[in-house]
Image: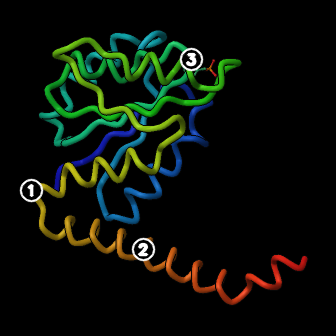
């Protein structure tokens, strides 16, 4: 199976990025996690992206905060799909990173998930890889069924508890 790369701009992004790794592990997708910065290690970022397809990666996930150019810098150097996670790491609450990540020029797409949306980045990567992997498609489908079941159970519980909740 193709691998997923989770690249973050700084170790300070790690806590926000961790849910992506946990989700990829749950879905049995091989991945690597790296700290590579578009600004502080620009050569390494370009090299990683240029070599990613030959190294067996199928999707790149890029997480960065503030003036978040990492996803775009990777996309500029690879034909692989790049998913950007804007990280909430500044006085602007992540809006800066969201705009920096999502506002790519025509011809150079980055699929941007929500601010700190690491879990969705992993699920989207899984959905992309699942297009050519039936077993993975089954695991993605099972994940959906699992969350559907959880919501139904919570609603059933709410119906049982509603009077108690209103009286509290
Ligand atoms: C970005 O700047 C990183 O992705 C991080 O979110 C932010 C702050 O980095 P540090 O100064 O904490 O290393 O490049």
Q: What residue is disc 1 on? A: 132
Q: Residue at x 39, y 39 (%)?
A: 6
- The local secondary structure at tag 2 comes to helix
Residue 66 is tagged as: 3
With 107 as the anchor, is 60 left or right in this view? right
From the top left corner, tell me how far across and down residue 138 is, in percent. 21, 72
- The local secondary structure at tag 3 comes to loop
Q: What residue is disc 2 on? A: 148
- Tell me which corner region of the image, top left, top right, bottom left or bottom right, holds residue 102: top left
Disc 3 crowd rating (10 Å Cα; few below 14, some 14-19, many 20+) is: many
CA distance for labels 3 and 2: 35 Å
Q: Is residue 136 above or below residue 17?
A: below
Q: Residue at x 57, y 33 (%)?
A: 13
Which of the four quarters of the rendered structure image does ligand 1 lie in? top right
Q: Is residue 52 above or below residue 152?
A: above
Residue farthest left in this picture:
132
Quadrant of the rendering where the N terminus is positioned: bottom left
Q: Residue at x 89, y 79 (%)?
A: 167
From the top left corner, tell me how far across and down residue 4 is, in percent. 29, 45
From the top left corner, tell me how far across and down residue 133 is, in percent. 12, 61
CA distance for labels 1 and 3: 35 Å
- Tell me which corner region of the image, top left, top right, bottom left or bottom right, holds residue 23: bottom left
Q: Is residue 29 above or below residue 134?
A: above
With 77 as the anchor, is 148 left or right in this view? right
With 31 as the anchor, is 100 left or right in this view? right
Q: Is mark 3 within 8 Å of ligand 1?
A: yes
- Going from N to C along the chain, the mark reached first, 3 or 2, is 3
Dot in front, 1 or 2:
2
Dot in front, 3 or 2:
2
- Going from N to C along the chain, the mark reached first, 1 or 2, is 1
């Amino acid at each position: 199976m193709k691998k997923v790369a989770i690249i973050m701009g700084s170790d300070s992004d790690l806590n926000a990025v961790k849910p992506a790794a946990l989700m990829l592990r749950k879905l049995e997708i091989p991945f690597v996690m790296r700290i590579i910065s578009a600004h502080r290690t620009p050569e390494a970022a370009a090299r990683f992206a240029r070599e990613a397809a030959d190294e067996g990666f199928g999707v790149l996930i890029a997480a960065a905060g503030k003036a978040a150019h990492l996803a775009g810098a990777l996309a500029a150097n690879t034909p692989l799909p790049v998913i950007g996670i804007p990280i909430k790491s500044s006085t602007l609450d992540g809006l800066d990173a969201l705009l920096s990540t999502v506002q790519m020029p025509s011809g150079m797409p980055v699929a941007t998930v929500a601010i700190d949306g690491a879990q969705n980045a992993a699920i989207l990567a899984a959905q992309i890889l699942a297009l050519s992997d039936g077993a993975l498609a089954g695991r993605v489908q099972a994940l959906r069924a699992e969350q559907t079941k959880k919501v139904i159970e919570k609603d059933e519980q709410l119906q049982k508890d509603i009077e108690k909740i209103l009286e509290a």
